[in-house]
């Protein structure tokens, strides 16, 4: 480490805005975890309230485990996230490789933009889009497909069995385009000389993909996967709350920690309990990401996150 | 070559990861107040009042209310112009929908101590009692002593009915002081079918007309049921807490035993009746997924709706929805905690100009012109006079009144076309007819069972929509709900209510 601080100054300067954003958005709010152990009572301003509220220990954590749904909610959160983590790697990588092989520049851009488009839609908009498909009386599927075919209409919002597939579909539909861009950028960064050398040696396109592209994408897949694992207890609130229209009949398959906490607490305005739920998710998420990283390091220490 | 490649790849990867992380932060939606709270941390300024002698300097007054969300700019401008020489405020007036839409927006703002000056609060929106006890609302006793006008309008008793431990945290709208439930029926159909409104005494009496609607009026659904705004209200449970918390008495003072109203035999009978109606197509197949009764009523595609009643309700709802209605009273008139707590304005603790906010609220009780401007909009744009104190709403003006019962003195509202000349008289009679319920004035303190109440609310939220609209077969669902209530601790909640209520009965023996 011979580099003096002075010679590295430009790099530190470049780091500054990022550190600032991180500190403001992620570090300063961390003081808020105190609220999880308090009976929060507003007192003049937020910071003063933090110091004057009464400490109540772990009582705020109790409500989550009181719920008859605590198990279902946790199970749903983890299972959906596991499926999302796997599919968010497999499908975008496949599509990114496919798009990269396309020769027509115009069509390539067209496909990429089309796939990217849903990413910019709010979940609220998506939920109405979904409703126009699934509504019993006037939904497209019942009115446009099932009834003309002489089949019986399905009351989608009362049939939990269809919803895991529907939710996974909407998740992929929304995020695939975004993930493709990430992988596509990494593929473009691969040195073409590898492929040239491979072709000279008589490798087929498929072999090139299997032995060059995928191995070089692996570190990125592992890192993105690990980051997603860290948020395994945090579900995508917009998806799980809005798309099933917050229907009680579907809670067995659509209720996740975030929606449960939101529903239980939005009417109570109990800040302490909300913070407790948030802290619970963060601590469990932290434990999972460390465990996952440990496992990755055991297998291949180069690919671990830290 | 290889090292250079990996370097580039590494940088690329880290940049992408950072981008991913940052976008990840940006779109997280958590209801936790800590996010929204932080940026507001600097609002530590203590309220400083300008003295009365000097001309008042202009201040901004933010007013958030329930009501259909619409463009308020021209109303704000008119109010600012009208008060320029007296109160001199810049009003920021906003409506955020009704109960379940309004509450989740207001609650985090209150918890964060945002500088809002006036908010609507009640037992069904923005949880008045919870928020007052948590210290989110300013105590108003000193202002009430300094400015006695509001008390002279509402009377001391009505004002005191909203007190918590002898302190006023909000100002109740001066309006009818009793309630009952009944039907709003679409006027053109009532006339076409020649329905004698006096013959309608219960939900069953409407059944032949429901059949008639189905047979003769394709596209019209006989009965509108949206969330809690459904025939459920005809049972009129005398509840101890919010509508989605178990614990209630019968509304005829027959005993003092607290029961779980969601599992009572009357309720289960109603779930079955609703199931029957759902199968007969009296209720829309998509009912359980609808979420705004006001918007549904405005479509004109419904025949009957269960609503809270008072003399003149139909005309009021006609103005709100643009569809003409007839009213039919069904349940007996009672006086409960619901009324005084039903519509109030509070001054949040974050307000920088509480005194000016209070003066503005006072004007809503004393200044008829301001009250009507806030309610009906601007003269000759949103309404026009057709008599001395009587107006006609101009349709599609871009602003529709969401109801004069939300704030101030409801008796000062101009009469709408079709409203009885002696409306105030009718209201007084209505108030007199009300049976005072035995728990009038009792306040349940949920502190000891906060976890159980939260869990019970979740149980109700899980099941009520499909049961109230008859969308599911009630037998297995009620069993499921009963088990869920057990795990959630509904019995503890009810036992706690019973205990507090029994103690209150002894100390307040009338």
Image: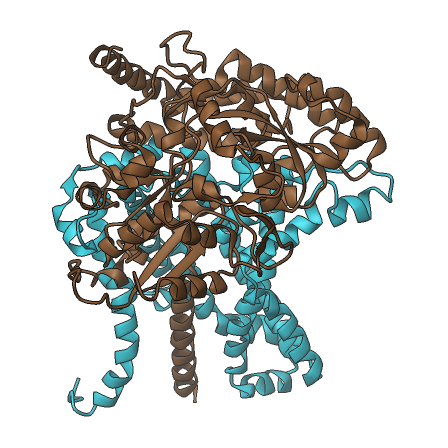
Which quadrant holds the C terminus of chain B?
top left
Tell me where residue B85 appears, x and y as whole percent: 31, 66
From the image, state the color of chain A: cyan
- Farthest front residue? B388
The residue under the point 45% across, 69% down is A220
The residue under the point 53% across, 62% down is A89
Residue A26: image quadrant is bottom left
From the image, state the color of chain B: brown
Residue A211: image quadrant is bottom right
- Farthest top residue? B254
Res B223 seen here: yes
Residue B15: image quadrant is bottom left
Which quadrant holds the N terminus of chain B?
bottom left
Res A282 seen here: no
The residue under the point 80% across, 28% down is B193
B27, above or below A12, in the image: above
B6, above or below B131, in the image: below
Tell me where residue A10 appears, x and y as whole percent: 25, 89
Q: In the image, is B23 to the left or to the right of B504?
A: right
Tell me where residue B382 appears, x and y as whole percent: 57, 57
The residue under the point 69% across, 44% down is A135
| Nearer to me, B167 or A66 | B167
| Nearer to me, B196 or A230 | B196
> What is the total number of numbered labels drawn onto the structure image?
0
């Amino acid at each position: 480490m011979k580099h003096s601080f002075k010679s590295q100054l430009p790099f530190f300067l470049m780091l500054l805005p990022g550190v600032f954003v991180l500190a403001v958005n992620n570090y300063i709010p961390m003081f808020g975890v105190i609220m999880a152990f308090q009976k929060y009572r507003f007192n003049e301003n937020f910071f003063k309230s933090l110091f004057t509220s009464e400490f109540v220990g772990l009582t705020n954590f109790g409500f989550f485990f009181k719920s008859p749904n605590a198990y279902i909610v946790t199970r749903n959160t983890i299972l959906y996230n596991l499926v999302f983590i796997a599919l968010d790697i497999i499908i975008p990588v496949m599509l990114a490789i496919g798009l990269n092989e396309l020769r027509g520049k115009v069509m390539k851009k067209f496909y990429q933009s089309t796939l990217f488009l849903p990413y910019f839609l709010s979940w609220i908009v998506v939920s109405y889009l979904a409703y126009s498909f699934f509504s019993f009386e006037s939904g497209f599927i019942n009115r446009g497909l099932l009834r003309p075919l002489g089949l019986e209409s399905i009351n989608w919002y009362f049939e939990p069995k269809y919803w895991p597939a529907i939710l996974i579909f909407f998740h992929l539909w929304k995020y695939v385009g975004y993930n493709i861009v990430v992988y596509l950028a990494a593929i473009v960064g691969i040195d073409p000389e590898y492929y040239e050398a491979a072709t000279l040696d008589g490798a087929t396109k498929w072999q090139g993909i299997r032995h060059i592209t995928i191995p070089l994408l692996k570190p990125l897949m592992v890192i993105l996967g690990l980051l997603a694992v860290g948020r395994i207890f945090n579900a995508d609130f917009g998806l799980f709350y809005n798309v099933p229209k917050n229907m009680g009949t579907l809670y067995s398959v659509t209720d996740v920690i975030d929606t449960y906490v939101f529903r239980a607490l939005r009417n109570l305005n109990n800040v302490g309990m909300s913070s407790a739920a948030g802290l619970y998710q963060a601590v469990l998420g932290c434990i999972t990401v460390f465990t996952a990283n440990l496992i990755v390091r055991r297998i291949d220490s180069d690919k671990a996150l830290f | 070559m290889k090292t250079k490649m990996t370097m580039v790849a590494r940088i690329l990867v880290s940049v992408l990861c950072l981008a991913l992380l940052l976008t990840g932060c940006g779109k997280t939606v958590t209801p936790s107040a800590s996010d929204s709270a932080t940026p507001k941390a600097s609002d530590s300024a203590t309220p400083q009042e300008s003295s009365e002698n000097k001309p008042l300097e202009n201040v901004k007054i933010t007013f958030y209310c329930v009501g259909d969300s619409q463009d308020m700019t021209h109303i704000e401008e008119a109010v600012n112009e009208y008060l320029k020489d007296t109160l001199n405020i810049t009003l920021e007036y906003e409506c955020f929908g009704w109960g379940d839409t309004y509450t989740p927006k207001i609650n985090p703002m209150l918890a964060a101590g945002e500088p809002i000056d006036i908010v609507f609060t009640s037992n069904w929106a923005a949880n008045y009692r919870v928020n007052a006890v948590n210290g989110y609302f300013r105590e108003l006793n000193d202002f009430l002593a300094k400015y006695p006008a509001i008390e002279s309008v509402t009377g001391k008793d009505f004002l005191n009915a909203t007190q918590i431990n002898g302190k006023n945290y909000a100002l109740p709208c001066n309006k009818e002081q009793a309630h009952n439930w009944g039907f709003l029926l679409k006027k053109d159909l009532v006339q076409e079918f020649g329905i004698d409104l006096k013959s309608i005494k219960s939900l069953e009496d409407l059944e032949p007309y429901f059949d008639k609607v189905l047979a003769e009026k394709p596209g019209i659904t006989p009965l509108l049921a949206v969330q809690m705004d459904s025939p459920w209200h005809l049972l009129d449970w005398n509840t101890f807490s919010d509508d989605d918390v178990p614990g209630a008495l019968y509304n005829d003072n027959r005993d003092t035993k607290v029961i779980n109203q969601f599992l009572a035999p009357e309720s289960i009978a109603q779930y079955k009746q609703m199931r029957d109606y759902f199968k007969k197509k009296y209720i829309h197949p998509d009912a359980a997924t609808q979420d705004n009764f006001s918007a549904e009523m405005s479509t004109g595609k419904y025949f009957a709706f269960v609503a809270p009643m008072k003399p003149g309700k139909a005309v009021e709802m006609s103005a709100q929805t643009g569809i003409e209605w007839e009213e039919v009273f069904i349940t007996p008139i009672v006086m409960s905690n619901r009324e005084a707590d039903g519509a109030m304005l509070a001054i949040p603790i974050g307000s920088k100009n509480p005194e000016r906010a209070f003066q503005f609220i006072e004007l809503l009780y004393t200044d008829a012109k301001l009250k009507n401007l806030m309610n009906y909009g601007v003269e000759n744009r949103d309404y026009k006079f057709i008599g001395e104190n009587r107006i006609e709403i101009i349709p599609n003006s871009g602003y529709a009144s969401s109801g004069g019962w939300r704030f101030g003195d409801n008796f000062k509202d101009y009469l709408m076309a079709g409203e009885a000349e002696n409306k105030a008289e009718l209201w007084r009679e209505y108030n007199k007819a009300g049976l005072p319920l035995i728990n009038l004035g009792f306040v349940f303190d949920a502190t000891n069972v906060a976890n159980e109440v939260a869990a019970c609310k979740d149980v109700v939220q899980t099941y009520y929509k499909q049961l109230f609209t008859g969308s599911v077969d009630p037998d297995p669902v009620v069993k499921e709900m009963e088990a869920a209530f057990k795990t959630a601790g509904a019995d503890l909640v009810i036992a706690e209510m019973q205990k507090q209520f029994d103690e209150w009965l002894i100390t307040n023996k009338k």
